């Protein structure tokens, strides 16, 4: 299902459908605006277009929920350090995850 816009929101909602999300203290995304982007177009803000886009995003999230797919942190590899410790603050867990993903890639 292709979207005419809101791809970032749709992706975040799809991720949320399979694993709980967390808020972290630091910004993790940078939103750049320019005159040629989709949201700068009047068509993007057309009420019918917006409603269709929202409905499609909700249908996608509902489909993901209905198949009961779940992501379990640490299930990708069997290393002992891949388990998530809920007592560790989200920012530190994010740093630990990045460390695991980049392990062995040091220059």
Image (tube, grey):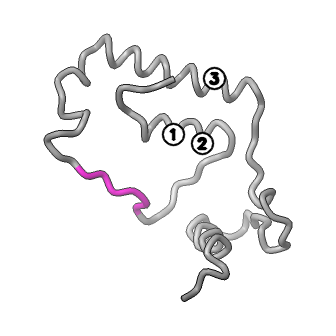
**Mark 3 highlights which residue?**
62
Q: Is label 2 in contact with label 1 (beta carbons under 8 Å)?
A: yes
Mark 1 closeness class: few <14, some 14–19, many ≥20 residues within 10 Å: some
Inter-mark Cα distance, 2 to 1: 6 Å
Which quadrant would residue 41 be assigned to in this image?
A: top left
Q: Is residue 8 above or below residue 102?
A: above
Identify the residue at image location x=60%, y=64%.
Answer: 90
Q: Is residue 64 above or below residue 22?
A: above
Q: Secondary structure at mark 2?
A: helix
Q: Is residue 56 above or below residue 93?
A: above
Where residue 102 appears, x then y in whole percent? 61, 75
Where residue 83 appears, x then y in whole percent? 79, 66
**Mark 1 highlights which residue?**
11
Sooner in the amino-acid sequence: mark 2 or mark 3? 2
Inter-mark Cα distance, 3 to 1: 13 Å
Residue placed most toward the observer, 78 or 70:
78
Quadrant containing the C terminus is: bottom right
Sooner in the amino-acid sequence: mark 3 or mark 1? 1
Where residue 66 appears, x then y in whole percent? 73, 23
Identify the residue at image location x=35%, y=30%.
Answer: 5
Mark 2 closeness class: few <14, some 14–19, many ≥20 residues within 10 Å: some
Q: Secondary structure at mark 3?
A: helix
Q: Which residues are magenta?
A: 27-32
Give the side of residue 82 with respect to residue 107, left or right: right
Q: Is label 3 in contact with label 1 (beta carbons under 8 Å)?
A: no
Q: Secondary structure at mark 1?
A: helix
Identify the residue at image location x=64%, y=68%.
Answer: 97
């Amino acid at each position: 299902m292709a979207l005419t816009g809101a791809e970032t929101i749709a992706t975040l909602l799809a991720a949320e459908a399979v694993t709980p999300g967390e808020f972290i203290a630091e910004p993790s995304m940078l939103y750049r605006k320019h005159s040629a982007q989709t949201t700068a177009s009047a068509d993007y803000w057309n009420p019918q277009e917006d409603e269709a886009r929202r409905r499609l995003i909700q249908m996608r999230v509902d489909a993901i929920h209905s198949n009961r797919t779940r992501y379990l942190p640490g299930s990708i590899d069997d290393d002992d350090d891949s388990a998530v410790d809920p007592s560790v603050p989200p920012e530190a867990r994010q740093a630990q995850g990045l460390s695991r993903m980049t392990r062995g890639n040091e220059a």
